[in-house]
Amino acid sequence: MRITLVGTGYVGLVAAVCFAKLGHEVIAVDREPVIRGLKENKLTVWEPQLEPELADVYAKRLLSFETDLVRASSDTDALMIAVGTPTRSDGHADLGHVHEVLSHLMQAGTCPPLVIIKSTVPVGTCDELEATLLAAGLHTEVAFNPEFLRQGSAFKDFMEPDRIVFGCKTPQAESLLRQLYEGIEAPVHVCDRRSAELIKYASNAFLAMKISFANMMSDVCEGYGADIRHVMSGVGADQRIGLEFLSAGVGYGGSCFSKDLQSLLTTGKLIGSSLPILEAVAKVNDQRIPRMIAKLISLWGNPLGKRLCVLGISFKPNTNDVRDAPFLTLLAQCERHGIEVQAFDPVVRQVGAKTVHVMDSPYAAAAQADAIMIMTEWPQFAELDWPYLLHLMRRPYVLDGRNLLPSQIISQIVEVDGAIYMPVGRSMECSPNPWAGVSSPE
C-alpha cells in the first residue's frame, strides 16, 4: 500500500518506520524544520531501535519525508493522522492539529479514500470529521485505529501487539486496514468508531487505576510495616489481575495517562457521568510527589537551602520524553520549598526550567547534596558506586522513589555512617551510626 502519515512525533514516527518495515510505501509529513532534521537523521524523540530502523527503511526508499501535505497525499491509498491532541485548560482534548490537517485537504478539494485517525480523540470525533469532509464535497471514510505503544518498547508493541483495533463503518475500510497490518500476527478487534475511541481511553484509564491502587496500598504498607513488593506480587499472581502496572512509586506520568484520564473525566461530565473511580485515581496520583517531599522534610527539618540530587528526568526509562513527567511536579514542589535541584538522566540533557541544574554524571549531581531521590527506574542507576556516591554528599540520605535498588546495594548504603534509605511502601533502613557529617574520599 501507499500511505501518507501526518505527524512525526513519538507515535507517528514509530508507526511510519514499522509500516515501512512491513513493505508499504510510507510518506511522512511534518513541518519543514522537523523534516529537515529527520532527513539528516536528527531525531527529536529517543526510542531504542528507532535510529537504525529509520535509517534502514529510509535507505531502502520505503520511507520518505515531505512537507507539502496535499502533494504527499495525492494518489495514496490512505491518510493516517498521528498529530498531538493535548489537553486544553478546560480539560477537553485540543483537536486543533487534526482540524488543521483536514482543512488543508478541504481547501485543495482532494483527500484519499480513507482517513485513519491514530491520534487519541474524544468519542464521536470520527463521526464529526467525516461529516465535515462530506460537507466539503469529499466522500472519504474516517476510521479510528488507536495505538497502544509503550515508550521504551514501542517496536515490539507495534510488531507484536496484544490486539489491533479497527473502528470503521464499511467492509471496504476494514479491508484496507487489514491490508495495512498484513504481516502482523495479532487478534483484530473490529467495531464501530465510537466504541474504538472509547477503547483507547478506557484502556489507559484502567492502567492508571492499577498504578494508583498500588500507590494507595503502599501508604498502607508503610503504616503497618508491610512490604508493598510482596503484597502486589501476591495480588498480581491472580491471573484476573496480573502483575503489570502494580509497582508503587512516584506516580504515573507521560503524555498519555494524565491527558487521557482528564479527557475522559471531562467528556463524561458532558453526559452526566462523573466517573468517581477515575477522579480518585487522579487524586491519588496528585498526592505522590508532595508525599515524597514530606518524607524529605521529615529528615531535614527546615528544607530551605537544601540540595536534592534527582536521578532520572524522563517519565520512564528508555525514552527522553518529559511530558507530564513526575520530575516536573517534583521541580515545582522543590521551588516552592526553596530546595535546590541537581539532576542527571542518561538521555535527557536539558530541561526548560531555570530551577534545575542538569549535570553530566550522577556523581556530579550528588556532589554536596542533602539527599538523593531516584525518580526514574533507569537500570544503570542500580549499577552506580553507591558508597562513593554517598561520600560525595553532605548527608547520605536516599529516597528510592521506584524501589529500584536491590538488597545488596541497600546493605552497602546503610553501612555508610548516618545513611538512611527510604523506599516506597516498606520500612526505611538506617545506618547503626548516627549522622555526624561525611567527608569525601581521597
Image (cartoon, helix red, strand yellow):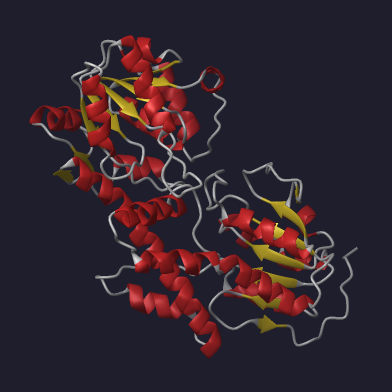
Q: Quadrant of the image for the C terminus?
A: bottom right
**Residue located at (53% from left, 17% from top):** 32
**Residue 30 appears at what percent x and percent y?**
46, 22
Residue at horizontal 69%, vertical 51%? 344
Location of residue 166 (image quadrant): top left
Give the residue at x 11% y 27%: 172
Q: Can you give x and y, in whole percent of width and height, for residue 156 in the image?
A: 36, 44
* Residue at position x 33%, y 10% in the image: 108
Q: How many marks?
A: 0
Q: Is residue 166 above or below residue 79?
A: below
Res 299 → quadrant? bottom right
Question: Which image quadrant for residue 37?
Answer: top right
Q: Is residue 235 left or right of residue 91?
A: left
Where the N terminus falls, by quadrant? Answer: top left
Residue 393 on image: x %, y %: 82, 66
Determine whether 119 is above or below 203 in the image.
above
Q: Nearer the viewer, residue 35 or 417?
A: 35
